[in-house]
Amino acid sequence: MPFTPAREAQIVNLIRRAARTEILPRFRALSEAEVTAKSGPDDLVTQADTAAEALIARGLGTLFPEALIVGEEAAEADPSLPDRIAEAELSFIVDPVDGTWNFARGLPLFGVILAACRFGEPVWAMIHDPVCDDWISAAEDRPTRLERPGRPHRRLRMGPAREIAEMSGFVPLSLVPEDRRPAVAALFPEFRRATSLRCSAHEYRLLAQGHADFCLGVDPKPWDHAAGVLLCRQAGGYAAFLDGAPYTAARRAGYLLTAASPDCWARLAERFGPLAD
């Protein structure tokens, strides 16, 4: 790309405005009619999701008229939309409210995810926490940093290499195919802690800050993972599919593993290897 500081600031301001005007006013104020189930009772969409995505898409379309914009809700309406990511010289992948289940239930554990990709390769990313109004960002040519209004940014680094028994991470067990779920659950005692926040935004934020060691992506939807992969890479981590293939936002199947280092990734991939068979 790369984006100029002025252009980055415009994108950040757009995301913050969407959070301020379309997301936070609806937090803990949704009516039943403003919450709808998609594929099942735990897969929700709210008026905050659709309104925020519309605002962000309009803003990005104005700033980057040549770009492909792939929002989670737009892809729900047109499932072929993500197929265009691999051929797009510039695409923006948007999750307007990641952690919608938490948001709809009044839990302040949700975020806005945005990734810019070149032919499916993430080149710029941010994950914004609307509640605290801070964000982490990275680009292909600069490291990951935590940014807060009116305060100096802080460079982030993933944690040091640890033994398996000392690792903590995120595994969305409910998304694992039912026939493989017992085998994955049996791995949990090997780790210091294995859990799920039901929110990729905060799981990747914790990873990039060194507060966790790994994240297993069972359903590698690009709006959940493209930004997080770049943020963790630029903080010293490593991400790839369990079959060894490098990450691309164009891939829509497989198990994605992000870890604190290539060595940690290799040891974890050995544990989770049966999933890739």
Image (cartoon, rainbow, N blue to C red):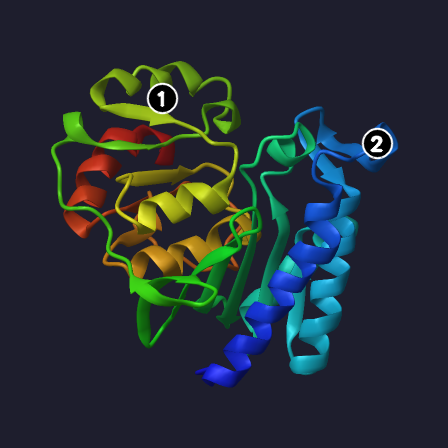
In the picture, residue 66 is in which quadrant?
bottom right
Tell me the quarter of the image containing the C terminus: top left
Q: Nearer the viewer, residue 223 or 166?
A: 166
Residue bearing mark 2: 31
Mark 1: which amino acid?
Answer: Val
Q: Secondary structure at mark 2?
A: loop
In the picture, residue 143 is in which quadrant?
bottom left
Q: CA distance from mark 2 to mark 1?
A: 37 Å
Q: Visible in this render: residue 209?
A: yes
Neighbor class of circle 1 (other Cα within 10 Å; few <14, some 14-19, many 20+) is some
Residue 4 position (above or below residue 250)? below
Taking the image as shown, residue 149 lies to the left or right of residue 87, namely left
Q: Which mark is residue 184?
A: 1
Mark 2: which amino acid?
Answer: Ser
In the picture, residue 34 is in which quadrant?
top right
Neighbor class of circle 2 (other Cα within 10 Å; few <14, some 14-19, many 20+) is few
Q: Indicate the position of residue 197 as horizontal and vertical percent values.
A: 47, 31
